[in-house]
Amino acid sequence: MKELAVRYAAFTFGLYLLGLAISLIVVSSLGTTPISSLNYVISLNTPLSLGMATFAFNMVIILIQFWLLRGGLGSKKDYLEILMQIPFSLLFSVFIDINMSMVGSLHPSGYLWRVGVLLLGCLVQAVAVVIELRSNVVIMSAEGVVKYASRRYNQEFGKMKVRFDVVLVLLAVGCSLAMSGHIDGVREGTVIAAVLTGTLVSFIVTRIVNPLHLR
């Protein structure tokens, strides 16, 4: 019981760090992460905060997961896993808004400072992902929809993840053009965040976590 409580606490801390990472990347003004790009565009062009837009997006993604498991493809465990995403999605959205209120007023001056904030956000995001993976509590909706889409269409998870991210970025660009007439939230930082975060996660796991035998 104590171990389970520690794992849930670690996962919650990881979610908080992820909310902080997204806020830092947004503040850099160099674009946001692929998974947050559509949410960010919606928050810029509607009364919704970034956290609220993220929660609405996650609810849609949860419904898509149920649809992907139609026809008896999913087990009771799968459905429970999806339902568990709802409270953590709400908590994650709250963490995003808390961190946006803390760092949202920051405006790094100069391109190098913005790159620095972007890189810091990528590092925090990588640490958050490692913590979430190691806690092994809940798979969040973005990873869940890729997992079940891979199962439905018999595709590798990595390839499906890339396609999912590309679709989100294209939707963000399309929505931004339709709603404001120009592109917001998708810049060079989006590509950097997409590539660098995975690299940092791999480095942290192989060079720090595994050698120290951390769980």
Image (cartoon, rainbow, N blue to C red):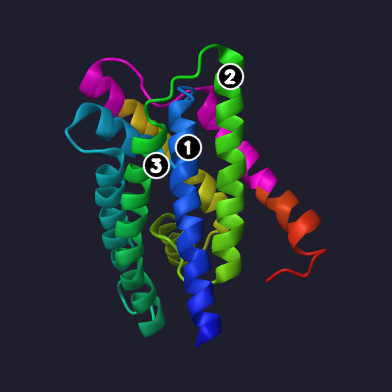
**Magenta part mainly helix, strand or loop?**
helix
Q: Amino acid at mark 2?
A: Trp
Name the disc covering residue 194, or none. none
Query: Residue placed at 48% from the left, 49% from the top?
Result: 18
Q: Callout 1: few (<14), some (14-19), or many (20+) C-alpha neighbours within 10 Å? A: many
| Quadrant assignment, res 205 | bottom right
- Is residue 194 visible from the viewing direction of this image? no
**Residue 181 is inside the magenta segment:** yes
Magenta part of the chain: 175-200
SS under mark 3: helix
| Quadrant assignment, res 167 | top left
Task: Say left or right for 134 vs 205.
Answer: left
Q: Amino acid at mark 3?
A: Asn
Which residue in the structure is indicated by mark 3? Answer: 99
Which residue in the structure is indicated by mark 1? Answer: 33
Q: Position of residue 24 (x, y in %)?
A: 48, 34
Which residue in the structure is indicated by mark 2? Answer: 113
Residue 164 against residue 169 in the figure, above or below: below
SS under mark 2: helix
Q: Position of residue 195 (x, y in %)?
A: 62, 38
